[in-house]
């Protein structure tokens, strides 16, 4: 069994910047890199394997051949359960919402989306939209979109590096300009755009809104959660670790290695290793900032060495 190194897929959405090139060193013919899909089996952007005997195959193909790589937890899902992205917002993203599984399966034939954001860096006064600033009814929701006063109802939050936002399906949200983040989410690309600041798309027309579907799925209330990771930072010999979020869909940890760390990839889940800083090795495989590894379930113990800042995700 071997560790799979993944080739990211890039998206040049209009709001994106160039920090994935300048900060992460990614090479792409695209001018802007809004998103890097770092762990993806989604049809809209599948990772290819860069190393070893599966080189050139997609991760989906490898997992179809080796269901055990998913682990017992991963096999419970009908489709590959998660999607992990790096996002560089040079400009504000549209205000949006995602449906839950029941609604999405019925209407869109894919999973709904619960997601979380881990803020990697941001401009000094960067802010984002997270839920509403008070409870509103669906009539007011529609009226305020129609008369362009929608932003008066949203909850704007100033962000700082290290914040963690847990965005359950149905929560209104928008990443604001000047924010670089890692997003761990359910494997879905269903987004209902609620408000787009009246901007025009690449074709010179306003981008489509999905107000009716958004009204169906949005919880029109303030968010239930704070903006801190759920765990405290724990310092061990050679590394420190902090639990960022744990829910029924995924468990995400920040691990900072100063010397060496031993992790376990047991039968329950694969481990996604996303390198967000530094350089080193994972069981001898050289890694640096921007690399993404998939360690199959059942691989056993793996050893990370060097000075590395990692995000580890399990299901
Ligand atoms: Zn979203």
Image (spheres, rainbow, N blue to C red):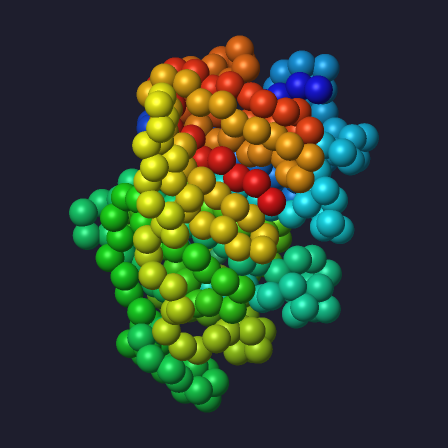
Q: Is residue 282 left or right of residue 81?
A: left
Residue positioned 27% across, 44% down in the render:
161
Q: Quadrant of the N terminus?
A: top right
Q: Is residue 117 left or right of residue 65?
A: left
Residue 254 or 101: which is nearer the viewer?
254
Asked if residue 37 can be seen in this view, the reply is: no
Residue 194 or 113: which is nearer the viewer?
113
Instruction: List the single residue furthest toward the front.
Output: 237
Whether 98 is drawn above or below 11: the answer is: below
Residue positioned 55% across, 48% down in the render:
250
Asked if residue 194 can be seen in this view, the reply is: yes
Instruction: List the single residue furthest toward the right.
Output: 65
Q: Quadrant of the C terminus?
A: top right
Instruction: Give how far across and how far down residue 61 sits, in percent.
Output: 76, 32
Instruction: List the single residue furthest toward the top.
Output: 284
Quarter residue 265 falls in: top right
Residue 170 or 46: which is nearer the viewer?
170
Residue 238 or 63: which is nearer the viewer?
238
Q: Is residue 210 left or right of residue 201?
A: right
Residue positioned 62% across, 49% down in the render:
187
Residue positioned 58% across, 34% down in the render:
271
Quarter residue 43 falls in: top right
Whether 228 is drawn above or below 192: the answer is: above
Instruction: Give how far across and how far down residue 31 sits, in percent.
Output: 42, 33
Instruction: Give how far across and how far down residue 191 sits, in percent.
Output: 55, 60
């Amino acid at each position: 069994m071997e560790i799979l190194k993944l080739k990211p897929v890039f998206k040049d959405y209009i709001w994106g910047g160039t920090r994935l090139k300048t900060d992460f060193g990614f090479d792409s013919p695209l001018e802007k890199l809004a998103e890097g899909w770092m762990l993806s089996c989604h049809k809209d952007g599948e990772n290819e394997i860069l190393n070893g005997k599966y080189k050139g195959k997609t991760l989906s193909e490898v997992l179809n051949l080796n269901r055990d790589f998913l682990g017992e937890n991963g096999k419970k899902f009908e489709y590959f359960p998660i999607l992990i992205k790096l996002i560089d917002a040079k400009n504000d993203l549209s205000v949006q919402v995602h449906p839950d599984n029941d609604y999405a399966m019925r209407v869109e034939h894919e999973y709904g989306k619960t997601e979380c954001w881990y803020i990697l860096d941001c401009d000094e006064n960067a802010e984002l939209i997270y839920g509403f600033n008070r409870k509103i009814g669906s009539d007011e929701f529609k009226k305020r979109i129609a008369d362009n006063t929608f932003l008066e109802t949203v909850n704007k939050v100033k962000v700082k590096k290290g914040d963690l936002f847990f965005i359950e399906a149905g929560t209104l949200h928008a990443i604001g300009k000047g924010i670089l983040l890692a997003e761990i989410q359910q494997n879905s690309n269903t987004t209902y755009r609620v408000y787009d600041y009246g901007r025009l798309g690449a074709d010179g027309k306003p981008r489509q809104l999905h107000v009716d579907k958004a009204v169906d799925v949005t919880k029109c209330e303030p968010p239930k959660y704070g903006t801190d990771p759920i765990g405290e930072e724990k310092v061990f010999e050679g590394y420190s670790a902090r639990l960022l979020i744990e829910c029924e869909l995924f468990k995400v940890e920040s691990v900072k290695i100063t010397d060496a760390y031993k992790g376990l990839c047991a039968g329950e889940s694969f481990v996604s290793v996303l390198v967000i800083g530094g350089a080193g090795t994972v069981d001898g495989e050289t890694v640096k900032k921007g690399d993404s590894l998939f360690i199959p379930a059942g691989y056993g113990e793996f050893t990370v060495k060097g000075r590395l800042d990692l995000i580890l995700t399990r299901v």
